[in-house]
Image (cartoon, helix red, strand yellow):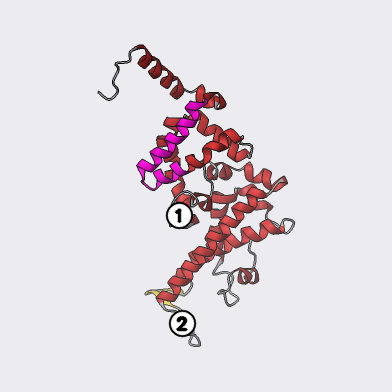
Amino acid sequence: MIIENIETLKQLIATVAGDNFDKYKPYLATAERFVKREITGTELFDLATPTEPDLLAMVQSVVAYKGYLEAIPFLDLLETDSGFAVVRNTNLAPASPQRVAELKAATAAKLDEAIEDLLEYLEAENGDIEAAWKGSTTYTLINDNYVSSIREFRKYGRFAGNRIDFIAFIPVLTSVRKLKIEPVISKELSEKIIEGLRDGDLSDDYKKLLSDLRFALAYFANGDEASGQSFVARVRSVLMADPDKYPEFKSSAIYAATQVAERDISEDPFIVFGA
């Protein structure tokens, strides 16, 4: 396990007490699987060793907060033959439900911060860490849109949840991109932009589209159709004004259809659309 003993866990979680590390192990193991599946991938996770102390510290922090958050509801419960009982220490007063709720909220906030810090660290890294990160399927999934983090999304739209909620929100963003944006700008152009963002080599012409695309994504995801359509229209205007700068769009079926429509109008100026 990436957290091997109670001392390391105590350094990361201030409210951990006692010497019984075994009660935390199942939750930490579940947290490790979550981190591998949703954030790092197995290869990068395995690089988090003392030879990479910064990566190790950040991954340990995510695992600790995720595991502890899952453990909190069960830490004072004990199963008996007649049902569950609450473990009491006569030297300590039991915490109120409100205090436990506050602890869970604070732990969730710390987890959210730890995940975002880890992602930002990975984005800035190179060498073996960069290769393991960008070669993982989790990297592809996280970076399969115009935004890749909750902090980035919040620059363009509202999101009240935490990072765990945002991971669950990713399919919504994917459907918005595929159903509301790509039918206007073309799948080919969209894929070019996402690939450029992943590789960090997006040209200035494509970067010029990003802000409006991100606003469109955020507004659509938040249910504001009118604003989303307005920002997609802004992108479309840029593309139509100079399609040669965007060959993926110019060679697409969407652009070809607009050329056919414009030709039909020029040949028959009395065509009235929507009639």
Mark 1 secondary-structure assignment: helix
Q: Quadrant of residue 207?
A: top right
Image check: 52 left or right of 168?
A: right
Residue drawn at x 29%, y 16% as measured from the top left = 270
Helix, strand or loop for the magenta stretch, by majority: helix
Horizontal and vertical percent for residue 125? 68, 49
The reply to whether residue 58 is in sight is: yes
Q: Which residues are magenta?
A: 215-242
Horizontal and vertical percent for residue 36? 58, 51
Q: Was residue 273 drawn as part of the magenta stretch in this picture?
A: no
State whether residue 198 is above or below residue 168. above
The reply to whether residue 26 is in sight is: no
State whether residue 92 is above or below residue 44. below
* Placement of the N terminus among the 4 image quadrants: bottom right
Choose mark 2 or mark 1, whichever is in front. Answer: 1
Residue drawn at x 49%, y 31% as measured from the top left = 238
Residue drawn at x 46%, y 82% as measured from the top left = 88
Extreme-front residue of the structure: 269
Say few, some or many: other residues with alpha carbon within 10 Å of mark 1 (under 14 / 14 to 19 / 20 or more).
few
Residue 165: mark in rendering: 1
Horizontal and vertical percent for residue 273? 30, 23
CA separation, marks 2 and 1? 34 Å
Mark 2 secondary-structure assignment: loop
Q: Which residue is mark 2?
A: 88
* Placement of the C terminus among the 4 image quadrants: top left
Q: Was residue 217 drawn as part of the magenta stretch in this picture?
A: yes
Horizontal and vertical percent for residue 41? 60, 48
